[in-house]
Amino acid sequence: MSEITETPISSDDDLPEEVSFDASKRAALKSVKDALESAKRERNLLKEKRRKRQQFFEEQKKLLPKELLEEFSTHQPKQPDVTESKEDEEERDDSSETNISPSLPENYSVKRVKDESASKSLQQNAMDFIQSHLYGPGTRRTTNEQLLSLKMKRGENQGKAVNFVNKNLAADARARYVKRNRRYIHKRKLIPS
């Protein structure tokens, strides 16, 4: 019977575990230390990214040696003979695309300045066109609210600006108009009663 009378103690009824001051201090210091370490790791990763990007830019800025540039300028493409068939021309085109100088590293390629400037000028012309037509001094940029207000002012169905449209105010104004109209008609005796 003693087993029945004893009620099991639930964990909700227990007192919270006592945590010593030293243990809580150690836990707080550890969390602060972990936060500092993670911030330091993030800063180091950011520094490494910047360093790699800087190296990449510096490598791009390096000029090719003069001997290499002279070698490419001496290899002028030959003019094809008129008597050759189109198949030979296609084969030559394929072989010229894959023919790369052995002295040129794999990640470098040679471009003529004329080709690059032509593509840049086309791109610049397109950007100028977009800039002048969309953002030039002749175009007025407005918000949607202003545009709707202008349509209400100038359109076929003229009305109040969008900001001031309020159904209750319109009903009150209509009632006042009807009242004034009746008063005016009554004073002038336009309609015999």
Image: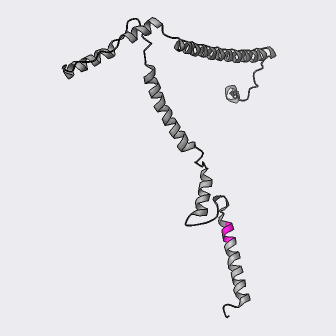
Which secondary structure dominates the residues rendered in magenta? Answer: helix
Q: Which portion, as a residue range, is magenta?
A: 168-172
Residue 132 percent coordinates (x, y): 54, 42
Q: Is residue 117 above or below residue 57?
A: below
Splitting the image into 4 quarters, where does residue 22 fall? top right
Residue 189 percent coordinates (x, y): 70, 91
Residue 33 percent coordinates (x, y): 72, 14
* Residue drawn at (59%, 66%) of the image: 158
How many numbered tags mark residues here?
Answer: 0
Splitting the image into 4 quarters, where does residue 136 fall? top right
Q: Verify whether residue 170 appears in magenta.
A: yes
* Residue drawn at (43%, 19%) of the image: 112
Residue 59 is left or right of residue 176, and the answer is: left
* Residue drawn at (67%, 74%) of the image: 174
- Name the colour scheme: one colour
Q: Verify whether residue 114 appears in magenta.
A: no
Near-viewer residue (44 or 147): 147
